[in-house]
Image: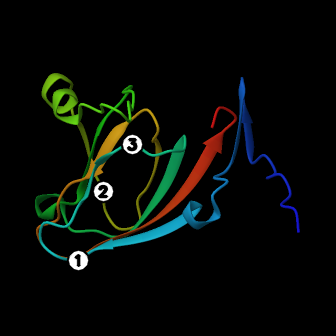
Amino acid sequence: MPRRQPRCCRQWPGNQYFPYPYEPEQFVITRLEEPGDTHGLHWDDYSFALVWVAECPPTDGGGFVEWIPDTVWDKAKPEVARLVRDRVVHTLSVSAGDVYLMRTNTTLHRVYPIRHRRRTIVNMAFASTGD
């Protein structure tokens, strides 16, 4: 059976935004449980992530996100260490019940390693016309 084209979920000037076309990553639930667990520095293949924080340790337990905006993912030579060294790393403390939207394909980002308790999130991915 042929797949139908995804229906546009939002149109902004110059772009349309769609649910991410790779179904297994449209909705992803992740849980970090052990001290040191992290979702390390990375870019995503799609434009946006809407993240709902279901459980999270306090900030001193690793309950925050770090990011470097306006970065380019050169898959052959990502130079993550250089970006961390040379650019401003932004942080956002998050708590259970928080929701945040991130431009994920041009933002190097990670979840800081947890020290105690759990971090559980639901990540909803969205693609732009350019994806």
Q: Nearer the viewer, mark 2 or mark 1?
A: 1
Amino acid type, mark 1: Glu
Classify residue 125 by image quadrant. Answer: bottom right
The CA span between labels 2 and 1 is 16 Å
How busy is the neighbourhood of tag 2: few (under 14 within 10 Å), some, or many (20 plus)? many
- The image position of residue 45, as x and y in percent, is 50, 44
Classify residue 2 by image quadrant. Answer: bottom right
* Mark 1 lies on residue: 33
* In the depicted structure, whether residue 15 falls above or below residue 22: above
How busy is the neighbourhood of tag 3: few (under 14 within 10 Å), some, or many (20 plus)? many
Mark linked to residue 94: 2
Mark linked to residue 87: none
Figure quadrant of the N terminus = bottom right
Most foreground residue, 62 or 47: 47
Q: Residue at x 25, y 75 (%)?
A: 118
* Mark 3 lies on residue: 43
Which badge, 2 or 3, is on the more N-terminal residue? 3
Figure quadrant of the C terminus = top right
Task: Please indicate whether residue 38 sits to the left or right of residue 74 in the image.
Answer: left
Q: Secondary structure at mark 1?
A: loop
Q: Residue at x 47, y 38 (%)?
A: 105
